[in-house]
Amino acid sequence: MRILITGGAGYIGSHTVKALAAEGHEPVVFDNFSTGHRWAAQWGRVEEGDLADRERIRSVLDKHCIEAVVHLAGSAYVGESVSNPAWYYRNNFVNTLNLLEAMIAAEVKRIIFSSSCTVYGIPETLPIREAAKVDPISPYGESKRFIERMLHWFEKAYGLQWLAFRYFNAAGADPDGDLGEQHEPETHLIPLVILAALGKIFPFRIFGVDYETPDGTPIRDFIHVSDLAQAHVAGLRFLSGQGASMPLNLATGSGESVGSIIRAVERLSGREIAVQPCPRRAGDPAVLIADASRASQLLNWHPRYGIDTILETALRWHSRNGGGKPDSS
Ligand SMILES: NC(=O)c1ccc[n+]([C@@H]2O[C@H](COP(=O)([O-])OP(=O)(O)OC[C@H]3O[C@@H](n4cnc5c(N)ncnc54)[C@H](O)[C@@H]3O)[C@@H](O)[C@H]2O)c1
């Protein structure tokens, strides 16, 4: 299939483009490189563009005879969304409306959307299932929820087929070493712990050491980025076979505490990490673990990598690429 990947130069997008190309698809990256990287767009064609420009999206869809869209482009900092909600409604919600309108006009009827576990807010029960209450506590999470609702109504009105992948914590790097995580600023736990081990962050701040968890630190469900990428390959196959539209959790279903991640990175890197216990952050639940069995069954998708591979690949990536790859490479 000829597939447009919005945000294909970003962290998850670039791994997804690689997986789609390996599967024989023809990926076309659509990205404005605001947080993505030119070095990460290594497979398929690249169309520089902004989702704010509906005509540009339409012309790219037509030019490449696109058959399906994987939509990852957007802004993804929870904290920033609280201080600047207008931007999150514009870049995530309004710009996705542009994309969907361009798709309908170009008669492209299949889309996989990058949603997020943040749509659930503070979960009432664990593990979190797709049927759980959707009640986001940040504009970021809410922008994802609005987009899911928009997809629902676009299916009814225009026959759009969609999957909303609710990723839990994406982590790790391409096992071949071609790609990895490079966000500026970095806010994700695993790269931050690794940067602390490499001496680039001092001390490492743990937000909350008094949770009701075995070591007092929060527990999260980490999923390897290449497993997420494979889920998109499986999701497109599912939609091509006229699979039903729905949200799906993408996770491993097992939890790791912040403390256990720190200890594992210390072991792997052979370096001690100086930690500073800090108060809990507002809105950070003690435990976030998903039930991803629906995605496993429907897509015949099974995560291949556990936490050890996540940490090994991420550590290798950050050790090799120091302070980050330059965008000219
Ligand atoms: N990383 C995670 O753990 C995680 C978890 C849940 C959901 N998500 C979602 O997955 C998606 C990808 O996340 P990521 O970590 O790879 O982020 P990322 O910032 O690395 O990638 C986002 C990409 O979108 C591009 N982009 C942003 N706005 C654009 C616009 N208006 N037009 C064109 N391109 C634009 C950026 O340049 C970048 O390449 C996001 O939608 C994010 O909300 C990520």
Image (cartoon, grey):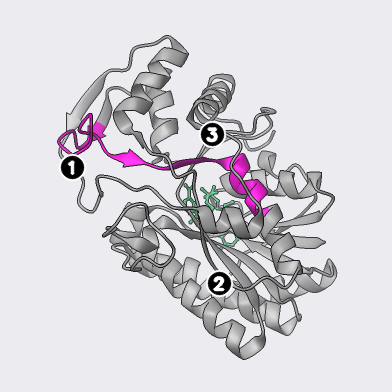
Label 2, label 1: how far apart the Cα atoms are: 33 Å
Which of 225/250 is in front?
250
Instruction: In the rendered structure, find residue 280 and report the number of the disc placed on it.
Output: 1
Closer mark to the observer between disc 3 and disc 2: 3
Left or right placement of residue 257 versus residue 246 in this view = left
Placement of 64 over or under 203, stated as above or below: below
Q: Amino acid at mark 1?
A: Arg
What residue appears at the point 30 percent right and 22 percent down from the top-left corner? 202
The numbered mark, 3 or 2, whose residue comes first in the sequence reads 2
Q: Magenta residues, as a range? A: 206-232
| Sequence-first tag of 1 and 3 | 3
Q: Is residue 299 visible?
A: yes
**Counting other residues with Cα less than 10 Å from the Cα at mark 1, is it few (<14), some (14-19), or many (20 or more)?**
some
Quadrant holding the C terminus: top right
Q: Secondary structure at mark 1?
A: loop
Quarter placement of the N terminus: bottom right
Residue holding disc 2: 96
Q: Residue at x 39, y 11 (%)?
A: 271
Q: Is residue 31 visible?
A: no
